[in-house]
């Protein structure tokens, strides 16, 4: 399905122009995708930043939903962070700082937050972006249980719109991280579009945003075209972004993406590349440079605790002992990652205060643990049973994730040596979202997620709190809930560190998840473009605050 989006007040001249070129600025017909961005040099080549040029970005896998408040899919947020930028962004130190938010203040009791948005921002259809939109977002997300927003705003008792740019949120409980977490994870919703939408899950959002680029054209599964917003106030001293157009092209997998890059069809990989692909591009006659940055996210295996076997901590412990985290990093991920020892990323060493580690890789120990618990192979088929039922699990993962098939196969090989039967199944993003994220219908899943950059509960509560929307594991622990609640309300950092240690000790004992690796995120960037500057975060080369400085040489 192809969509042409026309926003704002359109002059007669522009309307005629669009009609003349069939609604596509490149001159292609409505039945044809836009021309591939080749990053053509201008006649007077310059290395100085300037406005102009088209950047073609390749991504592995289709964005699930451009309405980011309905999606936790990375590709959706990768694309739309240029259209709907987060209110907070991550700086060079991995710390969150205001972006769309100009400033904020917290009351002494941490129950009242005054947030001021930057003035001069408008929705791409011409409507002003105001504090009314932010207040509406908070209410709407909770009312309709929308992804992260439902968790981030559920403590809001009331909101008070002071003026066009200022809103005051009154919380039912103190929160040390209300703004930093809400501001990073939730995009502002356009009130004028959604105020009469009763069923957001079945409403087709047109992609109108407030960022430095606007979505103008797309065909699902093929491409998404973004065009520059003139004089966007938060980039390059009010000049706006440099690149005129950014075209995202969708590829089935990283191999197809790399081939497209080598063929000159793609200028930069929006999806991080496996080591093998990096090597291919590094040998491509100087066409590409590899830009890299350590991820703030992590990869993990999650156990569905509603499963008859996986509800038993002993079984989870045995499975954890079959996870060769060193092998995953060196073999499956080809050395392009760091091993994790705890639920907190090793990027933040100061957040781990005591000697907390996941169980070591020990297949012999896993077998003994299961033998002692009475899980035995009574029919000698290589699979343990309990009460005549075999210990068989299906492991699912997204088919667009780099090297996760290799991670799954390493896990399968080792777990079956301990008497488990493991079936592997890759899912497309839609099926993964439906089965895992929404339905919790799986046994074991492998995925990458998460950002923890402070001693706060929101980064943890997104996944680990019993009643949060992202608790795919269906793991419920009153002690964990209590700790996370204390983390959120404790203003003293030293005390929060102590609480964080308590949380981690429980999780490496209970093991609803085993966090395994932190990637070094690497991207191939065409040397026809300059201005790349990667900072830690989720979006790599596509991070909005960085990409606005990229220009065609």
Image (cartoon, rainbow, N blue to C red):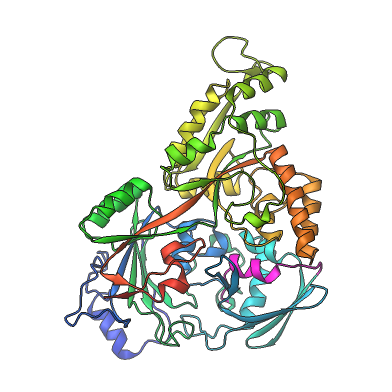
- Residue drawn 42% across and 46% down? 402
> Which percent across, then down, holds residue 426?
45, 39
Q: Quadrant of the C terminus?
A: bottom left
Residue at the left extreme?
43
> Which percent across, then down, holds residue 190?
56, 76
* Res 103 visible: yes
> Which percent across, then down, holds residue 281?
28, 54
- Give the number of callouts: 0
**Viewer-proximal residue among 115 and 140:** 115
Q: Which residues are magenta?
A: 172-190
- Residue drawn 23% across and 69% down? 29
Q: Is residue 12 left or right of residue 105?
A: left
Position of residue 13 relative to residue 61, above or below, is below
- Residue drawn 46% across and 81% down? 125
Residue 178 on the magenta segment: yes
Residue at the top extreme?
379
Q: Quadrant of the N terminus?
A: bottom left
Position of residue 346 relative to residue 405, above or below, is below
Position of residue 74 relative to residue 37, above or below, is above
> Which percent across, then down, holds residue 116?
65, 83
**Viewer-proximal residue among 109 and 173:** 109
Task: Locate residue 230: give its quadrant.
Answer: bottom left
- Residue drawn 46% across and 71% down? 544
**Viewer-proximal residue among 165 and 194:** 165
Q: Is residue 250 left or right of residue 387?
A: left
Residue 544 on the magenta segment: no
**Viewer-proximal residue among 519 and 448:** 519
* Res 475 visible: no
Q: Is residue 448 left or right of residue 178?
A: left
């Amino acid at each position: 399905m192809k969509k042409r989006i026309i926003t704002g007040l359109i002059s007669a001249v522009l309307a005629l122009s669009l009609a003349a070129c069939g609604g596509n600025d490149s001159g292609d017909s409505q039945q044809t995708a836009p021309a591939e961005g080749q990053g053509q040099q201008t006649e007077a080549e310059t290395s100085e930043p300037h406005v102009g040029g088209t950047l073609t970005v390749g991504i592995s896998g289709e964005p699930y939903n451009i309405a980011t408040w309905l999606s936790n899919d990375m590709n959706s947020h990768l694309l739309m962070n240029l259209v709907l930028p987060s209110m907070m962004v991550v700086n060079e130190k991995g710390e969150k700082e205001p972006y769309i938010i100009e400033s904020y203040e917290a009351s002494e009791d941490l129950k009242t937050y005054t947030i001021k948005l930057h003035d001069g921002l408008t929705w791409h259809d011409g409507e002003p972006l105001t504090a009314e939109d932010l207040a509406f977002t908070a209410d709407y997300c909770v009312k309709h249980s929308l992804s992260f927003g439902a968790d981030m705003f559920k403590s809001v008792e009331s909101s008070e719109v002071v003026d066009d740019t200022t809103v005051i949120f009154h919380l039912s409980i103190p929160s040390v991280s209300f703004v930093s977490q809400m501001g990073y994870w939730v995009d502002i919703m356009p009130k004028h579009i959604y105020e009469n939408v009763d069923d957001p899950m079945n409403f087709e959002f047109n992609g109108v945003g407030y960022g430095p680029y606007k979505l103008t054209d797309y065909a699902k599964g093929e491409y998404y075209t973004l065009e520059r917003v003139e004089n966007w106030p938060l980039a390059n001293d009010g000049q706006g972004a440099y690149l005129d157009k950014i075209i995202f092209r969708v590829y089935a997998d990283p191999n197809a993406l790399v081939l497209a890059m080598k063929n000159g069809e793609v200028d930069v990989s929006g999806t991080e590349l496996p080591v093998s692909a990096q090597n291919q591009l590094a040998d491509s006659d100087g066409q590409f440079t590899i830009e890299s940055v350590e991820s703030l996210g992590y990869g993990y295996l999650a156990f569905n605790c509603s499963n008859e076997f996986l509800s038993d901590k002993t079984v989870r412990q045995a499975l954890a002992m079959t996870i060769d985290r060193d092998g995953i990093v060196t073999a499956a991920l080809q050395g392009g990652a760091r091993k994790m020892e705890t639920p907190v990323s090793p990027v933040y060493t100061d957040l781990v205060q005591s000697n907390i580690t996941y169980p070591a890789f020990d297949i012999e120990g896993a077998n003994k643990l299961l033998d002692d618990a009475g899980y035995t192979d009574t029919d000698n088929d290589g699979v343990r049973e309990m009460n005549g039922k075999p210990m068989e699990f299906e492991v699912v993962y997204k088919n667009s994730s780099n090297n996760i098939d290799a991670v799954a196969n390493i896990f399968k090989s080792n777990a079956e040596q301990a008497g488990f039967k493991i079936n592997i199944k890759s899912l497309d993003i839609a099926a993964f979202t439906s089965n895992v994220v929404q339905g919790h219908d799986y046994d074991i899943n492998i995925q990458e997620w998460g950002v923890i950059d402070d001693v706060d509960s929101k980064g943890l509560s997104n996944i680990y709190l019993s009643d949060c929307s992202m608790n795919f594991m269906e793991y419920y622990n009153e002690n964990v809930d209590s700790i996370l609640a204390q983390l959120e309300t404790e203003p003293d950092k030293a005390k929060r560190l102590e609480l964080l240690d308590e949380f981690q000790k429980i999780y490496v004992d209970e093991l609803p998840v085993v966090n395994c690796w932190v990637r070094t995120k690497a991207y191939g960037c065409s040397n026809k473009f300059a201005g790349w500057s990667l900072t830690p975060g989720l979006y790599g080369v596509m991070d909005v605050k960085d990409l606005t400085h990229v220009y065609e040489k």
